[in-house]
Image: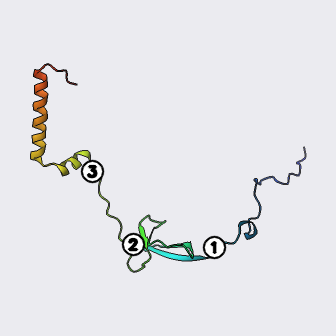
Amino acid sequence: MAGGGNAIRGSRVGAGPMGEAERGESAPRQNVSYFCSQEHRTMIAFAVEAQVPDSWDCPRCGLPASLDSDNPPPPPKIEPYKTHLAYVKERRSDAEAKDILDEALQTLRTRRKNGEVIF
C-alpha cells in the first residue's frame, strides 16, 4: 500500500508561522538583574512601563533575590517543626497546666459520683 500525500501530517490545528504580523508587536522590554545570597544572577524581562518588584525568587536555588548585587537578602531562617504540645507549652506554664488538669480531673470525678456516663 502506498502512503498517501497528507499535507498536514505531524501538524496541529492552528499551527503555522507565528510572526509579529499575527501576534502584533511586542511591548518594549527592559532586562532586570536579581542577585541571591548564593551569588546567582537572574535576568528577568519586564515591560518598560511595568513596575519592577524589589525582590524575586531565584529560579536556581529558591532563595529570595534582590536588585542589589552587593547586598543580597539573607536566606530565610527555617524554624523546625513544632508539635501541638510545643505550642501549648509556649502558651501555658507548668503551674497553669497543673491547675487546668486538676480542674478537669475534679469535674470527671464529680460526674462519676453522680452516675453520668462518660465517654
Few, some or many residues within 10 Å of mark 3 (<14, 14–19, 20+):
few
Residue 62 x %, y %: 44, 64
Q: Is residue 7 left or right of residue 96?
A: right
Residue 88 in the image: above or below residue 50: above
> Which of label 3 and label 1 is nearer to you?
1
Kindly identify the amino acid type of the residue bearing the numbered disc 1: Ala
Few, some or many residues within 10 Å of mark 1 (<14, 14–19, 20+):
few
Q: Is residue 57 left or right of residue 101?
A: right
Residue 81 x %, y %: 30, 52
Q: Is residue 6 left or right of residue 48?
A: right
Few, some or many residues within 10 Å of mark 2 (<14, 14–19, 20+):
some
- From the viewer's side, name the closer residue of 38 and 104: 104
SS at badge 1: loop
Q: Residue at x 14, y 28 (%)?
A: 108
SS at badge 3: loop
Which quadrant holds residue 75?
bottom left
Kindly identify the amino acid type of the residue bearing the numbered disc 3: Lys
Q: Residue at x 77, y 53 (%)?
A: 10
Write down the residue under mark 2: 37
**Label ID, residue 27:** 1
